[in-house]
Image: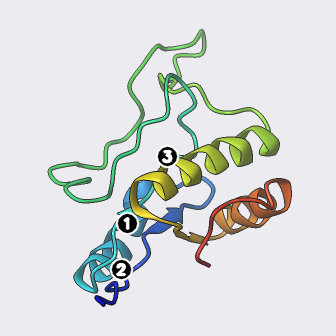
Amino acid sequence: MKTAIPTKPPYVLLHGFAQAPATWGEVARRLQAAGHRTYAPDLYEGKGDLKLSSWEGAGEGEKETEGGEGDTNAGGIAVAERDPLTSLEAVCDRAAAIIRLIAQADGAPVLVGYSMGGRIAAETVVRHPDLPLAG
């Protein structure tokens, strides 16, 4: 009888306030080198369908720029095209949906958060106690 080879769980990395998924770059590279798939969703992106994309290749060729793309408001301040989620509950519900997608694709993930991402991770687990998590 063959014994199943245990697979390494994927990681979901939640960034902090005023940060972006690229914050996790070095951590994601180290996790991947150890054989884990990594996901770092943009917690401020609320438009459209959930996109399940792993960290692999993300951030390559990106530059940090001053200001954002999008419309300019009456004060001449650039407004990002992103539609931020307006409540902690909405962000947690979105994070739970992302975790469920990842669990279906790669197995139960380990959820990690930094700063505000940690608060979101904790609240997500409280709001969704049935989430398929490895840790």
**Picture coordinates of residue 76 (x, y %)?**
52, 16
Q: Marks 2 and 3: CB-CB under 8 Å? A: no
Residue 130 numbered tag = none
Residue most extreme to the right: 126
Q: 78 or 105: nearer the eye?
A: 105
**How many tags in the picture?**
3
User: What kind of residue is marked 3?
Assistant: Asp
Residue 53 % position (x, y) = 34, 47
Where, quadrant-wise, is the C terminus in this rendering?
bottom right
> Is 115 drawn above or below residue 96 in the view shown?
below
24 or 89, which is in the foreground?
89
Q: Are marks 1 and 2 in contact (CB under 8 Å)?
A: no
**How far apart are the alpha carbons under marks 2 and 3?**
26 Å
Rendered residue at 72%/58% (across/down): 120
- Expressed as whole percent of the image width and height from the top left, the position of residue 15 reads 54, 61
Residue denoted by label 2: 7
Q: CA distance from mark 3 to mark 1?
A: 13 Å
- Indicate the amino acid at tag 2: Thr
Instruction: State how the image is colored.
Output: rainbow
**Who's the residue at 79% across and 38% down the image?**
87
Amino acid type of the residue tagged 1 in the rendering: Thr
Which residue is disc 3 drawn over? 42
Q: Which residue is mark 1?
A: 38
Q: Nearer the viewer, residue 107 or 94?
A: 107
Please tell me whether mark 1 or mark 2 is closer to you in this view.
2
Local SS, label 2 = loop
Q: Is residue 20 visible?
A: no
Kindly report the distance in space between the C-alpha atoms of the residues bearing marks 1 and 2.
14 Å
